[in-house]
Amino acid sequence: MKLTYRVEDGVRLGSLLWEFGPGWRMISSAMLGGGIGIRSWVLNAQVVAGYSRMDPVDHLVSLGPRDGDGVGMMTAASVDRYVHAADGGVEAYATVGLRVPTWAASPEGHADPELAPIRVGTVNIMAVLPVAMTDAALVNMVMTVTEAKSQALVETGFAGTGTASDAVCVAVPAEGPQEVFGGPRSEWGARAARAVHAAVRRGAEAWRPRRLK
C-alpha cells in the first residue's frame, strides 16, 4: 500500500493505493470498479469536504494507475490516518470519518445534517484475504465486513451503523480452491470480522477526540 499526496483547489489531499497486479478478484460497492470482477488495483482517494463534482468516476480514473482495471473509493476523511489490522492471514485497512454517523433504518423523510454527496463522515474499508472465494461467499464477506464495522461503531458509542457514504472492497486471489462461506462464523469470515472490527474500532476511538475539539 502506498500513500501519496496531491493538491486540488489549494488543498493538500492524500490517496491510498494498493497495486495488486494480475491474478486478483474483488467485490466492491465503490463507484469505480464496483461489483465483482478481476481488478489489479484499489484507490482510496481523499477529496474536499462537501465534494460536489458531477463526474466522480472520471475523477477517480484520473487519479488511479493507467494499467488495468481497478476499484476507486472516495472520502473526505484524512486518509493518512488510516488504520491497519490483521488476523490469521487477513489484512484490513480502514479510513474512518464519523462527523455524521447514521442508522441504516431511519424514518422516511429523515434528513441527516450537513447532507452532501461526500462528507467528512465516510468509513471506507479495504480487506485482503489469501483464499479464493465463490461469488456467494464474496457477497457474504461484504455482509460480514459491514456487520463488524457496525459492531465497532456501536461499541465506541457512535449513534449509527455507519455513514450514508461508506464503501467497502474485498480482494481475494482469482485462482485456487474456492471457499464457499464468508459469514462471521466461517473460518475466513471470522478472521475478516476480527480484523475489520479492530481497524474500525481503533479509527473510531481516534476520531472521537478530534470530533470533540
Image (cartoon, rainbow, N blue to C red):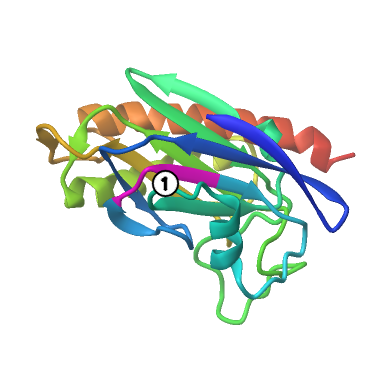
What residue sits 55% from the left and 69% below the top?
106
Name the residue tied to disc 1.
169
**What residue is drawn where x is 19% and y is 36%?**
132
Residue 61, percent across and down? 54, 58
Range shown magenta: 38-43
Task: Please tell me whether the stretch drawn in magenta is mainly helix, strand or loop.
Answer: strand
- Give residue 141's position: percent from left, percent from top: 30, 43
Asked if the magenta segment contains residue 41, the reply would be yes
Where residue 131 sits, quadrant-wise, is: top left
State which quarter of the image contains the C terminus.
Answer: top right
Q: Is residue 29 above or below residue 86?
A: below
Where in the figure is residue 85, as x and y percent of width and height?
A: 49, 23
Q: As rendered, which of 123 and 60 lies closer to the eye?
A: 60
Quarter assignment of residue 6: top right
Q: Specify whether residue 149 is painted magenta.
A: no
Q: State the residue at coordinates (28%, 34%).
A: 189
Q: What amino acid is found at the position of numbered circle 1 in the picture? A: Cys
Q: Is residue 150 visible?
A: no
Label count reads 1
Depth check: give the residue in front, 102 or 97: 97
Residue closest to the far left: 177
Residue 77 locus on image (x, y percent): 70, 46
Q: Is residue 167 left or right of residue 99?
A: left
Q: Is residue 149 above or below residue 74?
A: above
Left or right of 182 in this view: 195: right
